[in-house]
Amino acid sequence: QVQLVESGGDLVQAGGSLRLSCAASGSVFTINLMGWYRQAPGKQRDMVATITTGGSTNYADSVKGRFTISTGNAKNTIYLQMNNLKPDDTAVYYCYAYSDYDFSDYWGQGTQVTVSS
């Protein structure tokens, strides 16, 4: 089992920046991919960015050039640096992890990001 805890969500003006953090605990050695998804009211949950244990990253087209996903020194923490935020970035952001040990998806509780115009 893996537990994920996010932090860093806030209210920010358009053009501003935020950094989200996600700390994984439990069977972290089984994780081979982590990432961030987001869900706006009335919309589906969409991938924002992912990073593998090997360091390969993938971004949604809408955030390329503005958001950066990275891992911490302990490898059980990931970050999402969000720059030049837009009102369309307003959503609940969820941390995600995938374990190919038990083929399971894990989710955090979510953190709210609100961008005012």
Image: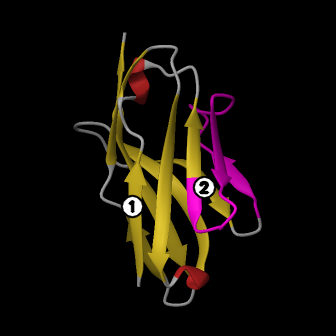
| Above or below for 45 versus 100 | above
Judge from the rendering whether residue 2 lies leftward or rightward of residue 66; answer left or right: left
Count how many numbered circles sit on residues in the image: 2
Magenta run includes residue 88: no
Q: Which residue is identified by label 2? A: 50
Q: Position of residue 7 (x, y in %)?
A: 40, 48
Q: Residue furthest toward the top?
A: 117
| Above or below for 12 versus 7 | above
Q: Position of residue 78 (x, y in %)?
A: 58, 56
Judge from the rendering whether residue 27 lies leftward or rightward of residue 3; answer left or right: right
Q: What is the span of residues highlighted in magenta in the rendered image?
A: 55-78
Magenta run includes residue 58: yes
Q: Which residue is identified by label 1? A: 5
**Which quarter of the rendering shows the C terminus?**
top left
Q: Amino acid at mark 1?
A: Val
Q: Amino acid at mark 2?
A: Thr
Identify the residue at image location x=38%, y=65%: 107
Q: How dense is the environment of label 1, judged by Cα within 10 Å: few (below 14), some, or many (20 and up)?
A: some
Identify the residue at image location x=50%, y=50%: 21
Identify the residue at image location x=49%, y=90%: 102
- Image marks 2 and 1: residues in contact by CB distance under 8 Å: no
Identify the residue at image location x=32%, y=52%: 110
